[in-house]
Amino acid sequence: MRRTRRESHLVLALVAMANPSTTCHSPSAPKPSITHVIFDMDGLLLDTEKFYTEVQEIILSRFNKTFDWSLKAKMMGKKSIEAARVFVEETGISDSLTAEDFLVEREAMLQHVFPTSELMPGASHLILHLHKNGIPMSIATGTHKRHFQLKTQQHGELFSLMHHIVLGDDPEVKQGKPSPDIFLTAAKRFEDAWLELHNVLVFEDAPSGVAAAKNAGMSVVMVPDPRLDSSHHRIADQVLSSLLDFNPTDWGLPPFDEVSA
């Protein structure tokens, strides 16, 4: 029996969720032509990772411990409770501070700084360009609804250009990154019967997010913090220092408009 393209898409999604490792491919493979784009948010579109770092450094200083980038790399992109468990267990403070209590303490401090969130360099230019050229976009972020509203309140017009937004507390997202759940959910909600997973390009800054996108059968452009160990770069299809360095034509997307001198 022949399947429709939509049925084939759903089968691919189920396979990816059941056995993520089967969908990863070599970063040296030819780049596909991209039809849809999915963005992570924290540290990629919005300069918010610094807030998490500062607050977590304050909490750890109480226990005479330091917060380093090897620990941050393990936490980035995960659901809040998953990241919190990593935090208290890896730092050896779980007997003194539970993951749940850590989140409560962190929440109180973050609520004051999230409304000051600024866009990362190149984010606005890229989103406006893709929108102008009719490329469907979405956001797939581990951020919960209450934090999303605080972080984006100064950037509502830009974020309104997304076809849809999938948040970390979405009921369809059963597991956080590196599970492919959130990216497969985002792809499904484009409601495009012709969408093929390998024609979806994900932008990520976190190692777990890159792994999640690859596990979903998608291509990934990684824009990591320069302090992140380069060993985390290897499975990304392309690694950039900034969104400003992205060349759409590398992926079969319309070129940026030339700026006259």
Image: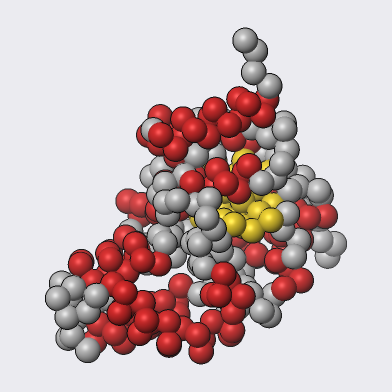
Residue occupying the point 78% across, 55% down: 131
Horizontal placement of 4 versus 128: left or right? left
Q: Nearer the viewer, residue 6 or 245?
A: 6
Whether residue 159 is situated above or below residue 197 in the rendered picture: below
Whether residue 24 is situated above or below residue 212 in the rendered picture: above
In the rendered image, residue 87, in percent from the top left (x then y), is placed at 27, 69
Residue 139 occupies quadrant:
bottom right
The answer, for residue 42, to whether it is visible in the render is no
Quarter of the picture containing the C terminus is bottom right
Quarter of the picture containing the N terminus is top right
Residue 158 occupies quadrant:
bottom right
Q: Residue at the front extreme?
A: 171
The answer, for residue 22, to whether it is visible in the render is yes
Q: Nearer the viewer, residue 37 or 179?
A: 179
In the rendered image, residue 227, in percent from the top left (x then y), is placed at 37, 67
In the rendered image, residue 216, in percent from the top left (x then y), is placed at 50, 39
Whether residue 96 is situated above or below residue 203 in the rendered picture: below
Horizontal placement of 42 versus 7: left or right? left
Q: How many marks?
A: 0
Residue 156 occupies quadrant:
bottom right
